[in-house]
Amino acid sequence: MAAGFAVFVEELLQPFGRVTSRRMFGGHGFYLDGSFVAIVWKDALYLKASGDGMATCEAAGLRRFRPSSKTPSYSLGFYAPPDNALEDPDALRPWVEIARSAATAPKPKKARRKTA
């Protein structure tokens, strides 16, 4: 991955909060105010989504992150924002808000195993 694109994404996300990043899984993970909101993989940005946010991304026809072409049915809850969002912070804002919401949503509790 070109380091230049990761720097570009870091600058792109700065209007939305404190941005930190780290290398992970051969790409970069991005955090806003400590919450994991995005990944950069092969010079493409993908923002986290869950619940209603996933439905919004699907309805908008956004491309879902698929880390391997060998298993195309495997995907994660991250979506590439529209191309114009990479050039305009106002166009990016709704997608970042979906990512922030997904990143900060309470995790569902796991069912406890009953013991006899």
Image (tube, helix red, strand yellow):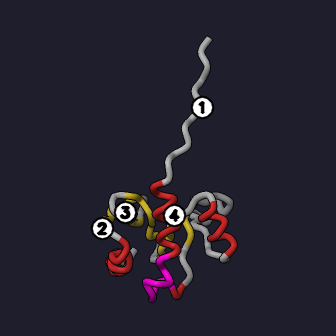
Label 1: which secondary element = loop
* Residues at discs 4 and 1 in contact (Cβ within 8 Å): no
Does the magenta segment cover residue 89? yes
Which residues make up the magenta segment?
A: 85-93
Task: Report how far apart the C-alphas of labels 4 and 2 lie in the structure.
Answer: 17 Å
Q: Which mark is residue 6?
A: none
Instruction: Residue type at mark 4: give it.
Output: Lys
What residue is pinned by disc 4? 48
Whichever of labels 2 and 1 marks the residue nearer the N terminus, that label is 2
Task: Report how far apart the C-alphas of labels 3 and 1 lie in the structure.
Answer: 29 Å
x and y percentages locating residue 83 in the rendered image: 54, 85
Residue 21 seen in the figure: yes
Which class describes the residues within 10 Å of circle 3: few (<14), some (14-19), or many (20+)?
many
* Residues at discs 3 and 2 in contact (Cβ within 8 Å): no
Q: Which mark is residue 31?
A: 3
Q: Which mark is residue 111?
A: 1
Closer-to-camera residue (53/43): 53
Q: Measured along the vertical axis of the image, is residue 87 above or below residue 48?
A: below
Label 3: which secondary element = strand
Q: Which mark is residue 18?
A: 2
